[in-house]
Structures are given as C-alpha cells and as structure tokens.
Image (tube, rainbow, N blue to C red):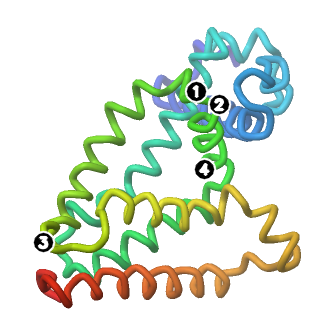
Amino acid sequence: MALSEIAPSRRAKLRDDLEQSILLAAEKVFANQGFEGASVGKIAEAAGLSKQNLMYYFPTKLALYQRVLDEVLDDWLGSMDALAHSKLSPEQALRAYIRAKLKFSKTRPTGSRLFALEVVSGAKHYGGQIKSRVVPLLREDIDTLNRWMAPEHAPISAEHFMFIVWAATQCYADFAVQMRLVLGEGCMTEAFFNAAESTLYHMALAALQRVSQKAPLLDF
C-alpha cells in the first residue's frame, strides 16, 4: 500500500513516530559527540534510516540539533514551574522542585548532558533560545525565593542558591559515569535517587531556614 493511500490520521501518526525515532537517535549522538562531531550520516544510521530519508524530515544538521534541544528544553522547563507557579507551601514547593529536577536527570540523562555540552561550548547554536525561554522562568523562581527570604536581611543570594540546586540535581545525569565508577554500575536505583532527593531537600531547606532566623520566611 502506498503512503498516499493510508488514512491521513494514520499517516500523521507514522510521521510523528518516525520523527520521534530520529530525535531520540539524534539526542544520543549529539550528547556523545557534540554538534561538531556528530554527522547527519551517523544520526541516520543510529535511527535506521538513509541519510536522504532523514533529511526529508530535517533538511540540515542545525535544524535537527535545535529541534532536539527544543524537546529537551520543553521537558526541563516543566520542572521550573514547581517554585514560581506552585500553590504549595515553600517547603512543599522546594521539595517538588528538587524532585522534578532529579526526575529529569534520571529519565533523560542524555538530554541533560546534551544541554550541558551546548552551554559549556558557549551556547553557540542555542543561546538565543536559552535566553528567551529559560531566563524569564529563572527570574520568576528567583523572585519567589526573594519573597520567601526578605533579601535585605538574607545572608544568601537567591541567584546562587538556584545555581547550586541546578548543579546538584543535574550532576546525577551529567556526571553519572563518575558516580558509577565510584559506587558501582548498579548504583543508580530508585532508592539512590530517593536518597538524593531527601539529602538535597534537607540541605536546601536548612539553608533557607537559617535565613529565617534573621527574616522569617513566608509560610515556614
């Protein structure tokens, strides 16, 4: 049966499935080899397609790279809503934020590593999107922390607090190889991530509660 004879809804699903297969393969290749080291041919091979077939869907390597990062960023930004847009108490919102960030590292480690690689490389191919999409949400989260902390009395910076939480949660993807070398190949279990969540949450909470000794936190 020719593709033109397939029902439109089925054709759309087949196309979506194929695009997702390409994006998954591309995410892994880009994360392992970077934008410069990856080639359309390598990605096509990983996706089980010809180079010509892949380029029908993504005409250039840059278009494919940016689409992969779009998908990664969509997933990552979902975790950033846990502070600014939460109706939870500060304690609950903080834990939800850390849990969401760790979940991203656990379920999408190649995406996290790819994003980190792009940033470390100078964000040459995706800097504009990061500025337009990440920065506004980060500012909202920082403003939320500042409301909790009464910054004129706070001994810690909300900006640096957020960077520390990012680094601490993303290391479980970006430095997973190091953790496996130190703790063993089977270390990254559900219990391992639960322990990470509890540890990071209580460390972050303790830092904020120290602030409250000088300026009471809202709702704490």
Instruction: State the separation of the CA atoms marked 4 and 2.
Output: 22 Å
Q: Examine the image and state in which quarter residue 118 appears.
A: top right
Label drawn at residue 112 = 4
Contact (CB < 8 A) between labels 3 and 2?
Answer: no
Crowd band around label 3 with a 10 angstrom C-alpha radius: few (<14), some (14–19), many (20+): some
Asked if the residue at tag 2 contacts the one at tag 1, i.e. Cβ–Cβ closer than 8 Å, the answer is: yes
Disc 4 marks which amino acid?
Answer: Ser
Earlier sequence position, callout 4 versus callout 2? 2
Q: Which residue is mark 1?
A: 15
**Relative side of 95 to 42, left or right:** left
Give the SS element for disc 4. Answer: helix
- What kind of element bears circle 1? helix
Name the residue tied to disc 3.
150
Image height of 23 relative to 2, above or below: below
Q: Residue at x 33, y 37 (%)?
A: 133
Determine which quarter of the picture holds residue 20: top right
**Residue 30: x and y, percent?**
72, 33
Disc with the residue nearer the chain's start (3 vs 2): 2
Q: Amino acid at mark 3?
A: Ala
123 on left or right of 149: right
Tell which of 31 and 158 is nearer to you: 158
Viewer-nearest of labels 4 and 2?
4
Hey, what amino acid is under mark 2? Leu
Residue 174 drawn at (x, y percent): 67, 55
Whole-angstrom CA distance, mark 4 to mark 3, is 32 Å
Q: Residue at x 61, y 55 (%)?
A: 108
**Element class at badge 2:** helix
Along the horizontal axis of the image, is 115 left or right of 42?
left
What residue is shown with label 2? 18
For marks 4 and 1, give the CA distance: 26 Å
- Relative to 125, residue 188 above or below: below
